[in-house]
Structures are given as structure tokens and as C-alpha cells.
Image (spheres, rainbow, N blue to C red):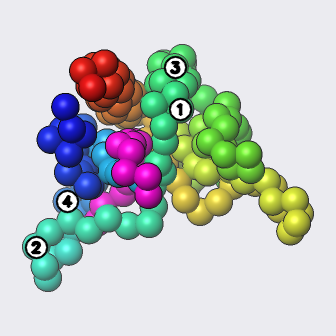
Amino acid sequence: MSYDRVMPKFEREVIGSVLYGPSHRIQCCVVHYRNHKNQLKWYGDLRFYTYSVKKVKFYASPKGITFTQEISKGLVNVVNALPDEMPILKEGEQTIIEKFQRYPTLWVAIGLVNIAGETKIDIREWIKVDNRGYEGFTTKGIRFSYDRRFELSTMLMGAFNKMYDMEQKMKGLDKDD
């Protein structure tokens, strides 16, 4: 069976969405695409969207993070292990709970941050660039209210399950060829 019958060149499938007021939402998707070798690949995408009143639709902002199936499972485990009682952090304090390596110099870090007196879950890229001497967070990431951690966990688990199902489907197609 041909891979072309399975999926087009690029497709975005929404797993879940959480509203943050009337003009903002965080959406979790699984993106399927074909790489330069025409191989089917996929990744998860957790992104902040802003509503445009002029155009009457939501627009993706650069605020967000992409992740693999393995990273999504790790993030779910960390979020599910968070205590029911919200940890008290000092204003501006940021802690890293765990980092998941994506590339040799790039990790996806999950931690907690206190902004304006509220503790939030922070999922952000963390890099180590030897030639510039920088090691730390990038601007690519997303903060999620601690109170809504179960919704975050549900979306990340949905993305993991979707990527797992796609992997199993592709293994079945490889056997048919």
C-alpha cells in the first residue's frame, strides 16, 4: 500500500483546546508531514492562539512548543506527578522539574514559575550553545495555569496516543508492502 493513500503532504489534527478568556486559547495538535525523503513524520504542537476581531478568527503566535511522542509521555508523567497543593514560589522564581533531550543542544524543559504571584507550569525550550556560551531557556514555550494541569495532561496524553496510533498504523503498512 502506498503512503500517499494514507496522508497528504501536511496535516494538522487538533487534539484539544483550552480557552483563556474571550480572546486567547491554548491548543494541542499533532502535525503530520513528509520530510525531504518523502517519509511520513509527526510531532506534537502546544501553541498559544490570539483572536483577531478584525479577521474574526484565531491566529497562532510564536508562543508554543513542539515535541516528540517520547517527550509528550515524559511531560504527562511530570504533570500527573505534581502535587494537588500548588507549590509556593517567590515572585519571579523559576524551577526546572525535568528536561527531555530533543537534539544534542536542545531540550524541552518543564518546570514551575511564579509570575505576578501566581504559580504556572512552564514548558519551554532549553538550549546550550557552546560557541556563544549561552545555556538556558529560549523564548519558545508556553505557560499553563497550575489550576488547569489536568486539562494540560489530557491534551498531552491525547497527543501521545495519536502519535502512537500513527506509529502502529505505519508499522502495519510496512508489513503489507
Q: Earlier in the sequence, mark 3 or mark 2?
A: 2
Please state the horizontal and vertical placement of residue 124, each as a whole percent of the image.
58, 49
Q: Amino acid at mark 3?
A: Asn
Q: Earlier in the sequence, mark 4 or mark 1?
A: 4
Q: Which residue is label 4 attached to?
A: 22
Q: Which residues are magenta?
A: 36-50
Q: Nearer the viewer, residue 136 or 24?
A: 136
- Label 1: few (<14), some (14–19) or many (≥20) C-alpha neighbours in 10 Å: many
Q: Residues within 10 Å of mark 4 (few under 14, many from 20)?
A: few
Amino acid bearing label 4? Pro
Badge 3 vs badge 4, beta-carbon distance below 8 Å: no
**Distance from label 1 to label 3 (Cα)?**
10 Å
Looking at the picture, tell me which residue is in the foreground, 136 or 101.
101
Q: Is residue 120 left or right of residue 177?
A: right
Give the amino acid type for the residue marked by disc 2 in the picture.
Answer: Val
Residue 77 image label:
3
Q: Which residue is mark 2?
A: 56
Comparing 14 with 143, the one in front is: 14
